[in-house]
Amino acid sequence: MLSGIKVLLAEDNPTNQLVATHMLENLGAGVVLTDNGVDAIEAARRDSFDVLLVDIQMPGMSGEQVIREVRERPGPNAAVPIIALTAYVGPVERDAMARCGADGVISKPILSIEGFGDEIRQIMERRKPPAAERHANGAEGAAGGLLPELADHPVFDAGALASFAGLAGLGRVAALIDQARSDLAEEAETLASAIERRDQKAVDGSTHKICGMAGAVGAMRLDCLARALNTRAPGPCDMRYSAVVRTVWDDTDKALATWAAESSRQA
């Protein structure tokens, strides 16, 4: 039901953490867990997610504060669905959550895995913008017009992998994809962090490595992005590029995982 969905879960109670994580993983989602509001905001600033699940009652910083901060601060998750988790769900609570930027509220305790997944999916679908708006808010939109050439390159082109599969077989292609996803994930995060540190030397080194890997597995938009940053040498680095890197990598990783899964089913 939530296959391939990447979830940020902010929940301070250990029991609730175990229950929610177990349910989400069994629904097919990948889960990043934080147990306080400060770490949740940092995770939302650092990485891209498909949905944020935020407990409202957390010590130090409330879930409401977390939601407001994510919504108001520019970053990769400012426009993604955010769902509040709370034991008290009445009209007053729903109105309060809507005002702070939440797209929906799910009540605790969570008793049904199917119901939990269905509620998340419904709230996510309500948040989804029209196709034209999604295009505008994609990687080229996140670039703020800095890299319009990204729009001319597909996220993923299966040609290279299909050719390799014809020569080496699907088993070796699966191993190649696993290795590439691991290496590219590490390098994309290295690049984004280097941009945030304004470390031009590290940006140059990281983009060079990505250029050497991305095209080989059909990651065309990521390859385009790395080449643009490598040749353009924006230095001092524009901080907006870090969000673009993470957005493009997230889209690329999903495309590679989907292609690998479909190929395995056809084998």
Image: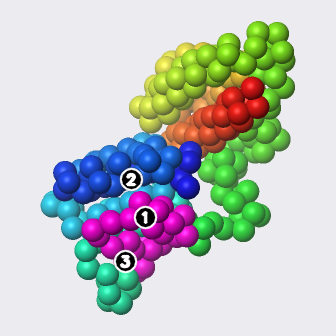
Stretch in magenta = 97-123
The reply to whether residue 267 is in sight is: yes
Q: Which of 117 and 204 is in front in this view?
A: 117
Question: Which residue is outermost to the bottom?
Answer: 91
| Quarter where residue 228 is shown | top right
**Amino acid type at mark 3:** Met
In the depicted structure, whether residue 78 falls above or below residue 18: below
Q: Which of 93 and 66 is in front in this view?
A: 93
Residue sitting at 44 percent across and 47 percent down?
26
Q: What element carries label 2?
A: helix
Disc on res. 23: 2
Packing grade of label 2 (10 A; few <14, some 14-19, many >=20) is some
Residue that mark 1 sits on: 116
Residue sitting at 21 percent across and 67 percent down?
57
**Amino acid type at mark 2:** Met
**Amino acid type at mark 1:** Phe
Disc on res. 246: none
